[in-house]
Every structure is written in structure tokens, then in C-alpha cells.
Amino acid sequence: MAATARSTALQDGVVIGEGVVLDTRPASVASRLLAAVLDLVVLFVLGILTILTLGGLDVTLDAQTGRVVGIVAVAVVTLVLPTTVETLTRGRSVGKLVAGVRIVRDDGGPITFRQAFVRALTGVGELWLTAGSVALLCSLFHPRGKRVGDVLAGTYGSRVRSAKQVRRPAVMPPHLAGWAAHADVARLPDGLALAVRQFIARAPGLHPASRAELGVRLAGDLQPFVSPPPPAGTHPEAFLAAVLAERGRREGAVELERVRREQAEAVLLRRLPHGVPDPEA
């Protein structure tokens, strides 16, 4: 039965490390190929502009300097530029932005410098030296469309161009409101918070056995970040919903206080020095 539940979940979407189905789907090979072609076009245009700019400067280089400049240019195009772009944009180059693709971690979170660097370093071999043939073959045969760099970095291409869904806030179970208000909730890892949020939203549509198993597993993962633990006998889904609702309430209160403080500071800044009449008064 567990295998059947897992198979059903896999058909619905991407299952992350915590065993929760994400709403995002892996991008198709065609979308990623389109993004790669668009990125190549952008690089080609930038290269032409760079050559025209250097030509206008009328700079003459000897053979040795020319080789050094060539090596640096290759390193910048194949390694430095992709790593920098994916790190700063959290996995979205120009081509990926147009094609509706984002590179994310296997847990659904944004990629870091390490993952971007591994992808770029691997791409030297599977993209540039083999004209993309290795990456294309790997993407065609991998169930989530990963290329070799994605496998080594622990990432995948996520489809972000989809119907926009309204995220409903978690509802606080009434019998846990008192406990949650006084509980100490530490900052949750991004992957765990995303997993709990997606599970609460999709729980009604999951297979009952899978729903129960994932609820218990996520509640166990969440308990180390909450003190004191919920009252004995609390249902795992009620515990998850209470933590999410309380986090949302506290974050909303912090944001409201920040806005109030900024408004008060703005009023003070608009005031004229003491003794100078205010025409707006």
C-alpha cells in the first residue's frame, strides 16, 4: 500500500526529501533546451558587442597576451558567468526566465553558490566540449529531466510558468491556540517549512495511507524546533497546522510593527526644526 501511495504521489508532482509532493513540476526537456538556446544567443550577442568594443579601442596584443586573454575569456564564459548569474538570480538566467524554468534544489529551495558552481563546472564537459549531447541524453533518460550537473549538484529544473494558486493561510486548531501562543518556535529550515506548507495544502487530495504516513513523519521532523511539545494525543496534522498558523501570526505582527515604526519615523523626518512654523499645521 505504501508503494501504491508513493506511486500516486509521484504522478501528482515532485516528491522532495521529506516525502511531500510539491506543486511545481520538473521542466520538460524542450523547455530546458529552449532556455539553453536563448542563453547561447545572449552570450553570442554579448561576445559580438565585446569584440566591437575592443576593436574600437584599437588595442594590439602580442601572441602570448592573446593566448592569456583567450583562456580568461573561455573561463569567464563557461564557468564564471554561469555561476554568477545562477547564484545572483537564484537559478534563473535570461533563457530560463523566458522559457519559464528555474533551477532549484532537490528539496525545492533556491540554489546556492556551491550548486551553481558544480553545475557550471560540470557543464564545461557535458555542454561545451560535447556540444550539449551528453546533457541532452542524460535529460532524456532521467525521470526528472536532470543533466549530469544537476545530478552532482542535487538540483533540477522546475517549471514555474503555471496557473497561479492562491495560498490559503493555515488555520489554527482552537484547542491548540493557547499552547501555540506560548510555544517557542525556532526558525525552520526552508525545505522543512515548504514541505509542511505543501502537505497541509495538499493533504485532502492525498491517499489516506500516504497522508497519515507523511503527517507523522513531518510532525517528527518539526518537533525539535518547537518547545514545549504539543499536548499528548495531538493529531500530527493539527500540530503542523498550529505551528504554521502561529508562525504566520508572529511574522504578520513583526511586519505590522515594522510598518508602524517606519511610518512614525517618516512623520519625525517631515517635522521642521523646533521654532520654525509648519505650514501644514
Image: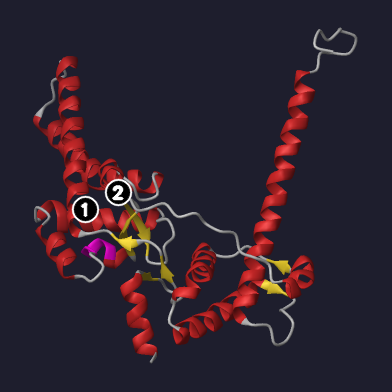
Expressed as whole percent of the image width and height from the top left, the position of residue 193 reads 54, 65
Q: Quadrant of residue 112?
A: bottom left
Residue at the image point whose x is 75% and y is 69% from the top: 177
In terms of secondary structure, where does tag 1 sit? helix
Q: Which residue is mark 2?
A: 100
Q: From what the image shows, is residue 154 above or below residue 76?
A: below
Q: Residue furthest bottom?
A: 1
| Amino acid type, residue under disc 1 in the picture | Ser
Indicate which disc residue 31 carries.
1
Query: Are the two marked residues, 2 and 1, in contact with CB atoms closer than 8 angstroms?
Result: yes
**Is 200 displayed left or right of 205 in the figure?**
right
Expressed as whole percent of the image width and height from the top left, the position of residue 8 reads 34, 79
Q: From what the image shows, is residue 14 above or below residue 8?
A: above
Residue at the image point whose x is 28% and y is 57% from the top: 119
Crowdedness of circle 2 by 10 Å Cα count: few (<14), some, many (20+)?
many
Looking at the image, can residue 125 be seen?
no
Expressed as whole percent of the image width and height from the top left, the position of residue 123 reads 21, 55
**Is 45 displayed left or right of 19 in the figure?**
left
Q: CA distance from mark 2 to mark 1?
A: 8 Å
